[in-house]
Image (cartoon, rainbow, N blue to C red):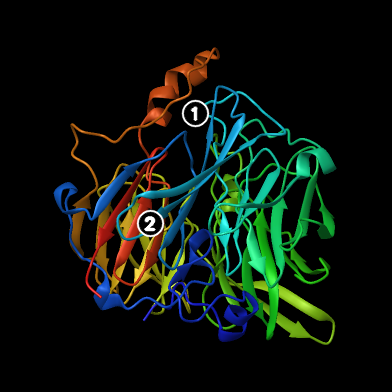
Amino acid sequence: MFSALTLTASLFCCLQLATDLETWPGFLGQGSSEVAAETLPLEWTPETLAWTQELPGYGQSSPVIYGDQVFLTAVDGDNKQTLLVFAHQLGNGQQQWSHKATSTFPERSSVYISRAAPTPLVDDNGVYAYFESGDVLALDHQGKPLWAMSLSEKYGHPTNEFGLSASPVQVGEHIIILIDDPAAAYLVAINKKDGSVAWKTDRKPRTSWSSPAVMTIGGQTQVVCSSAGSVDGYNPETGERLWSFDEIGGNTGTTPRPAGLDRFLVAASPGREGENAELARKSNGVMTVKQTANGFQPEFVWTDPSPVPSWASPIEHQGLAYWVNRAGVAYCLNAETGEEVYTERLPQSAWATPVGVGDHIYVFGRDGLTTVLAAGPEFKILAENSLWAEDSPPVNNLPKTEETDERRKAAAAMFSRPVVYGVAIVDGVIVLRTGSKLFCIRGEK
């Protein structure tokens, strides 16, 4: 049904989400409820959308869903000084509440720096929002503040010139956040109940924007981080690093994705200037971690030099692995062997990670066009669906401050266009988000 996004039963239990509610509780749907493929729409137009809603400020985070609520984050102000968390009704899109907080690390708002990039988390008891400023906010489902804390005040401000964007994950009563920065890099677990730090594990300083993933490896729940030169597995209860693989490069923007028992996909990009080209060609593929008498041993099952994604993570669905690169080329490979199945160009590139549901692969194009592919070895476009008309782009609240660097000024127009950043899916509903607008597409339950 939903193999690309369904975690094992033990992992789902450890996330402690209610089983009778439809949920998409975090980045890339980790821990999501099962989706019935027949309930999702195959085709839509701007005129047939269930609803749309303009959003305050700007956010690059994905929406999350819990029952009949959609939660989002954004930042506002010339220095991103206002942090926003808000909730909308899934049925009609109306805003239920909005919460504002003051950033403890304001920095100039720019199209080149992350703006509310980390996706929040939601569970039975609340919604947990982490911002690139280092602020972490916890609220209940009605928007009442539960607690707030600042990782920047506790452990130092980040120095990454493009900001931070790694989304947190949740395991049991812990929110786990990866901060990989040239000044300080660490993995930290925060208690959901009161915002206290449960553990913190230091990492080698680096520049990266990739998010961690929760995996089941050797029957054990682990947090896997693929980031700027290594892939590492951690014990989510203690923070102990269980294994590490460092023959990898260019893995700075994508998240590991499940690809079978004790297997997962990793992906790498050569970088803006091709600085990671050599290692990146050896770093796209399926990795496995085997439990031996000497501990966990990670290794690649296979790699392929062709796929080189930027922000969209690869997915596995029905035995096939799919990559989409920054030029909009889709690569389909046999997930077991790495054998090439097809390589074809899509109408648009994608920043959001594709989703496989039933016999369909949904590729959410950066510029609002969703391409629905037939799942399977034959490249077949089943539908091309626009969120907005070409002459009527959605509202896109841009920073008021202008770039002074000539190189950045020249490229500002490209980065200032509306971008589809993320998606959340439950039975009969697809919710998509650009920086300043929310879109809902409805099928039939």
Residue 193, compared with residue 51, is above or below; it is: below
Q: Earlier in the sequence, mark 1 or mark 2?
A: 2
Determine whether the residue tagged by mark 1 lies in a helix, strand or loop.
loop
Indicate the position of residue 219 as horizontal and vertical percent values.
68, 86
The kind of residue on which mark 1 rests is Val
Please identify, in this view, whether the residue under mark 1 or under mark 2 is nearer the observer. Answer: 2
Residue 417, compared with residue 119, is above or below; it is: above
Is residue 70 or residue 308 the one in the foreground? 70
User: As drawn, is 413 to the left or to the right of 391?
Assistant: right
Asked where in the image residue 302 lies, by quadrant, the reply is bottom right
Question: In which quadrant of the rendered image does the N terminus lie?
Answer: bottom left
Residues at discs 1 and 2 in contact (Cβ within 8 Å): no
Is residue 294 or residue 339 the one in the foreground? 294
> How packed is label 2: few (under 14 Cα within 10 Å), some, or many (20 or more)?
some
Indicate the position of residue 100 as horizontal and vertical percent values.
58, 38
Determine whether the residue tagged by mark 2 lies in a helix, strand or loop.
strand
Which residue in the structure is indicated by mark 1? 111
Question: In which quadrant of the rendered image does the C terminus lie?
Answer: bottom left
The kind of residue on which mark 2 rests is Gln
Indicate the position of residue 137 as horizontal and vertical percent values.
66, 49
Q: Which mark is residue 4?
A: none
Q: Residue at x 63, y 69 (%)?
A: 214
Residue 300 shows up from this direction = yes
Q: Residue at x 77, y 39 (%)?
A: 152
What is the distance, in whole Å, between disc 1 and disc 2 at their CAs? 29 Å
Q: Residue at x 58, y 76 (%)?
A: 263
Residue 231 shows up from this direction = no
> How packed is label 1: few (under 14 Cα within 10 Å), some, or many (20 or more)?
many
Which residue in the structure is indicated by mark 2? 89
Is residue 272 or residue 281 the one in the foreground? 272
